[in-house]
Amino acid sequence: MTVVVTGLGAMTCFGRGVDALWEGLLRADRRPVPAPNGCGLPEHPPLYAAPPGTGTPGRTSSLVVEAVAEAVAEARLSREDLFDAGLTVGTSLGDIDLAELPDGPERRTATHGVSAVVADRFGIGGSAHTLSTACSAGAYAVGWGARLIETGQADIVVACGGDAFSRVAVGTLHRFGLLDPECCRPFDTGRAGMVTGEGAAAVVLESAESARRRGVTAQAALTGQGWSCDAHHPMAPEPSGGQLRRAAAQALATSGLPGAVVLHRAGVALNDSVESTAVSEAVTAAGGDITRTAGYAPKAVMGHTAGAAGVFGCVIAARMLRTGLVPPNAHVTEVDPTCPMDVPLVGPVPLPRPAVLVSGTGFGANNAVLAWEAVA
Amino acid sequence: MNVLLTGAGAVAETLPDGAGDRDPAWFDPAAHLGRRGWKYFGPATRYLLAAGHQALGRRHDDPPLDGDPSLRLGVVTGTQYAIARAHRRMDDTLRTEGVRGISPAEVPAFSMSTPGSQLAISTGARAFSVTLTNPVTAGLEAVHFALTALRTGRADRVVAAATDQAPEGDEGHGLLDGAAAVVLSTPDAAGPDDALAEITGGLSRFLPRGPGGRRDPEAVAAAGARVAALAAGAHGVRLVVSAPAGAAPLAAAVLDAVAAATAGAGGSLRGSGGRITEARHCTVSGMLELTALARAGGTALLVSLSDSGHLTAIALRSPEEHRFHHSSAMQEPMGEGGIL
């Protein structure tokens, strides 16, 4: 069964909407702003901050509601359609702002209520699951959503992801040298760590038959996916990248050779190299020419959005396939020589082939790779 | 394809006579995990390692799997409070001492996926390690996830588990700690006499609020019909609805909806028509009920509900019935809204 995407939504540092995101990616000049006070540090770490979302108690929920509203509107889903639709939410920390309030009755410990907020708001009555595989949560949310459709458990699934500023996360990552103090520059040899970003993204997944029946346009088709776990270390990837390579090979087994790869690459040197090497080996083994495959790292201009990152990868892949363009990689003075892929620095450049791979990895090395193709 | 439940493990805090003060020493990690290799793990991770290894019939200090068995073993973990205490401690430290008061050893405790990652590392599970975090229902959702993963060929065996450490303060009032795990296998991967039970179906629904703020009765009725359909008109079905005290009225409505739909489909419930149990062990509650139903035998429907409107249901029956009805079971059509 073919799973297609019929609606996209985004809330990012570029503002509201997928058009604002795409324009920001094409401009390729966005830099982070200082994080709010209260990170327990003398200096302000950088942050790609998003504007406020709709008024719900949790900040992540408010961002996700905005992204889902856009995707649901584009897919022209009625309340009736959503009654049996599924929902998958990728989030690392949920509404963590509710747990970072001063001591008092408002300070919460349960922060993973995003799926209930979204399902209640839109009247979604099918499966409503929250996946928190750290930074690959979004990729798993999309992959699991597709599985629900492929197995006949839903015709339509709203797959989304979101994460927002956490002073504990930003302060701690900075304290232990995991944050680049300037900006996120994943393809630059001088990269010095990740930079967190706030945001939410959503895709409406649907069986091709359902999209045809409803008369809505399929923007891209999910043609393959692979999952794996390194089972190696709670934070670091296994250096050979063997399991990520296996996940990429699974995704490629049923899909066309990619013209571009939206990489998870966040500016952490070891992780970046392991990822691009593993994915490149899988593409090469499938018969692709990796030097003619574009590597793209959106986190340079929007930061690491944690549980949303994999969903953003899919939103960006769908836009690449629709426009036939790959945005330029930002903030690069000298290109990381360990990446075998073509790394466009000016552009946009044409997408060489109408297929895009999206790679997601996270703490504990929970890998997910998704393969998208253009719809004829 | 039905899936076999081939092992179960649990460590669950109890109260003496069901009441009284909690005993902070209820869990002895060394007794479950050996003397080494767990010192820097938080309680939720320790509980999960104990229950997961028990379900697999192995120990934390056994060498992890390698080769093909490792590539075909997955882990899926439900938890709602895995980081709650660590996060609060880190947030308080940050506000009082600054971030320099936070130890590097604490950093992994800040990820909801860390307990599942440690179980994957300890067992060598390389098919996937997925963490689900909906309140209360995430444990039974792990079973639903595992069932789908096995049916779609992502793994041959999956440890479906849940772990939680109840939070401090009002939010944790009346809640208890624990972890539980089951091993689910494809029939080919299970030994001939390994099965405790057969998992025949599973689904999740959300019950949105209707006008006036109450759960939409139409959604409750639809969920009841879908859950009842998992039992496919069977007779003498044990029905259990596990829900927190705050969701007791919703649990009663769901129980009634499932009972009505079961009768409407020509089936029947065992005894007086199902029971509601209080979910005190957070996401672990549904897993504890599942293990109890698997051991009780017969055909059962288990529903896990959260205050916030999540619902997950699992259908199971004893493996003897599976063998008896083997040829007809293989020809059953896909239930609407259920799994293949």
Image: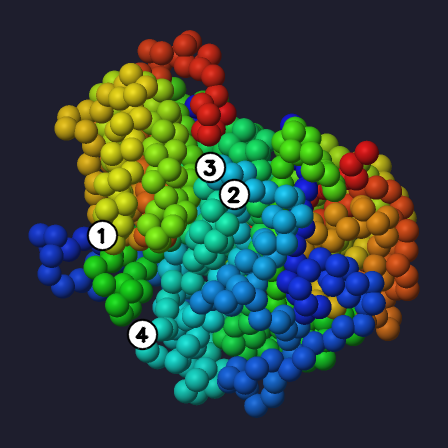
| Residue B290 position in % (x across, y down) | 30, 37
B162 relative to A10, above or below? above
When the figure is inspected, residue A366 is found, relative to residue A146, above or below; the finding is: below
> Residue A278: percent from the left, percent from the top?
73, 49
Going 77% across and 39% down the picture, which residue do you hit?
Answer: A373
Question: Which residue matches tag 2?
Answer: A79
Q: Secondary structure at mark 3?
A: helix
- Measured in 3D between alpha carbons, the distance from the residue under mark 3 to the one under mark 4, in whole angstroms, is 37 Å
Which residue: 29% across, 24% down?
Answer: B262
Mark 3 belongs to which subunit?
B
Q: Residue furthest bottom?
A: A42
Which numbered marker is on residue A105? 4
Task: Answer with left or right where residue A201 lies relative to residue B170.
Answer: right
Q: Chain of mark 1?
A: B
Provide the secondary structure element on which disc 1 rests: helix
Tell me the chain of label 4.
Answer: A
- Whole-angstrom CA distance, mark 2 to mark 1, is 31 Å
Task: Classify 10 Å Cα crowding around label 4: few (below 14), some (14-19), many (20 and above).
Answer: few
Q: Earlier in the sequence, mark 1 or mark 3?
A: 3
| Separation (CA) of disc 1 from disc 3 | 28 Å
Viewed as shown, does residue A273 lie left or right of B336? right
> Do the residues at discs 4 and 2 belong to one chain?
yes
Mark whose residue sits in front, 2 or 1: 2
- Label 1 sits on residue: B245
| Residue sitting at the far left | B17
Which residue is rendered at x = 54% and y = 78% of the image? Answer: A171
Number of labels in the image equals 4
Disc number placed over residue B146 in the picture, else none: 3
Give the left or right position of residue A87, taking residue A208 as reference: left
Report the chain holding disc 2: A
> Gap in Å between the C-alphas at discs 4 and 2?
35 Å
